[in-house]
């Protein structure tokens, strides 16, 4: 799959620039390839997925997740300036 010369010219050469767009952004269309596929799948992929699911379920079951409150008890609005990073600060 990653040796398809139509998709990856010169597949046997180390060319990390092939994973960037012309504007310099990361081209993540093949990000699932990091874990492999078929018989060569990463042995920890399913373990990691199950562990993550159990962890998230445990956190949701054990904690009351709600908006932060200030000193007066008013809810603090979330600043979404940084949510493109995958987290809310």
Image (cartoon, rainbow, N blue to C red):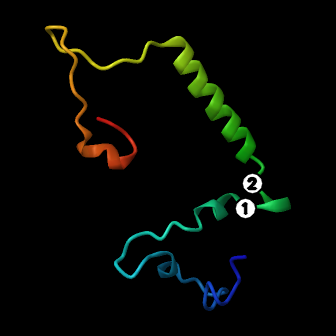
* In the depicted structure, whether residue 57 falls above or below residue 74: below
- Cβ atoms at labels 2 and 1 below 8 Å apart: yes
Q: Which residue shows up at 64% across the image and 89% down it? A: 6
Place residue 55 in its image quadrant.
Answer: top right
Q: Is residue 53 above or below residue 22?
A: above
Compared to 46, does 12 lie above or below?
below
Q: Tell me the residue that label 2 is attached to.
A: 42
* Mark 2 neighbour class, 10 Å CA radius: few under 14, some 14 to 19, many 20 or more: some
Please report whichever mark, 2 or 1, sits nearer to the chain's N-terminal start: 1
Residue 68 occupies which quadrant of the picture?
Answer: top left
Report the front residue among 87 and 15.
87
Q: Position of residue 21 (x, y in %)?
A: 42, 78
Give the quarter of the image for residue 33.
bottom right
Residue positioned 61% across, 85% down in the render: 8
Quick one: which residue is furthest to the top in this view?
A: 72
Instruction: Label 2, secondary structure: give it.
Output: loop
Separation (CA) of disc 2 from disc 1: 6 Å
Report the residue at 40% width, 45% height from top. Answer: 86
Residue 53 drawn at (x, y percent): 63, 31
The circle on residue 36 is 1
Q: Nearer the viewer, residue 8 or 80?
A: 80
Q: Is residue 52 above or below residue 63?
A: below
Quadrant placement of the C terminus: top left
At which x and y percent is residue 59? 53, 20
**Residue drawn at 71 percent across, 47 percent down:** 45
């Amino acid at each position: 799959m990653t040796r398809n010369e139509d998709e990856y010219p010169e597949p046997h050469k180390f060319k990390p620039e092939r994973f960037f767009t012309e504007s310099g952004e990361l081209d993540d269309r093949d990000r699932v390839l990091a874990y492999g596929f078929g018989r060569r799948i990463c042995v920890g992929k399913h373990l990691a997925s199950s562990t993550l699911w159990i962890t998230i379920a445990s956190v949701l079951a054990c904690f009351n997740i709600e908006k932060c409150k200030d000193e007066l008890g008013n809810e603090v609005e979330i600043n979404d300036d940084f949510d493109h990073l995958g987290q809310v600060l």
